[in-house]
Every structure is written in structure tokens, then in C-alpha cells.
Image: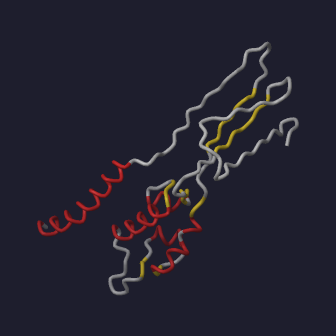
Amino acid sequence: MYGPDSNFVEWHRKPQTQETDGFQVKRPGDKPVKCTINLQLDFQPQHFKLDSRLGRLLGIHTATRPVIYSAFWQYIKKNKLQDPVQRDTIRCDEYLKSIFDCSTLKFGEIPFKLPPLFQSPDAIVIEHVVSVNSGESKSVTHWDVMVEVDDTLKQQMNSFIISTESQGMGDIMVQD
């Protein structure tokens, strides 16, 4: 689509498309044009933005499915929400009640209750003006976009902390 204040270019990366570290926009015309560039990051594995209520509760904004489920389970354990008699039942506290609109959840319901609270991650939005330069000089604009990359040291530290937490809790209970 091209016209006054309705400039739109859409590009979708295909599986066979090679990695790229930039792109170029050329256009005919003699007047500056405002444009908005929306970048949707291709997370591998897939990431999800959480519903704001669940995100605040779990302390997560955007994460992978396993991380979200793990954080949900940690919340249940930390707040002792698992029914001691019917171990397949979660007793919802006031926060979970407001999110799920029920007083109890069965563990088998979680895979059906959580995904509706998953959203696409936010796009990176760049506002830009494609300007017209007189003469032969060309204007080049660069943006640095921060992206998350796998950090193997972080994964190792998380594994270590989780393993020491389970061992340390027994020691603490004995000391109590």
C-alpha cells in the first residue's frame, strides 16, 4: 500500500531465508515520510508474554512455556496451595481466584487454563522519518536492538541453585 501517510511494507522471513543483520528501505518521492517499523523477534524456543495479572504474580513478563509452567508450580509450592488430602487439587488463593475465576483447580486443568493467558511477545517499535536529501549525500540510520541470547552460565547457575535449595531445606528443617 502506498500513498499519503499510508506507507506499508511487510516482510516475513521464510525458513530458507538466511540470517541478516540489517535492511534497507528505498522509496521514490520528494517529501519526507514518517514510518513505523515493527520488528517481531523470532524466539527459538517460542516465547510468550503473560497476561498482566499472571505476569505480576509470577514475576515474569515474557518467557518460554516450560519456564512459565515451572514458575506457576513454584508459586503453588511456595504458597502451599496444593491440597494435602487431594494432592491433584490446587486451592486457589485470592490472586489465582481473580485470574481463573474459581476456588480450586485440578492439575489436569492447568494445560487448558494457562495458555489462554499467553500472548504474542511485544514487537520492537521504531518510529522513523525517511528524509529526502538534496544532492548525492545519503542518510544512514542505525539502531541497536537488545535481544536475549542463551546464557549457558545462567542455566548452570539456576540448576545449582535449585539443587542446593532442595538439599538446604532439609538442613534448615533439622535446625528448626
Q: Is residue 149 above or below residue 135?
A: below
Residue furthest to the bottom: 85
Pick the residue in front: 175 or 149: 149
Residue found 15% across the figure and 65% down from its top: 171
Residue furthest to the top: 135
Does 157 sit left or right of 149 as displayed? left
Q: Is residue 155 visible?
A: yes
Residue found 86% across the figure and 39% down from its top: 2
The image shows residue 126 at horizontal and vertical percentages of 65, 37
Residue found 11% across the figure and 66% down from its top: 175
The image shows residue 162 at horizontal and vertical percentages of 29, 61
Pick the residue in front: 161 or 84: 161
Q: Is residue 104 visible?
A: no
Residue found 62% across the figure and 44% down from its top: 18
Does 36 sit left or right of 118 as displayed? right
Does 175 sit left or right of 164 as displayed? left
Q: Is residue 44 above or below residue 71?
A: above
Q: Is residue 125 above or below residue 78?
A: above
Q: Please state the total of marks drawn on the protein image.
A: 0
Residue furthest to the right: 3
The image shows residue 156 at horizontal and vertical percentages of 31, 53
Picture quarter with the C terminus: bottom left
Does 27 sit left or right of 173 as displayed? right
The image shows residue 30 at horizontal and vertical percentages of 85, 23
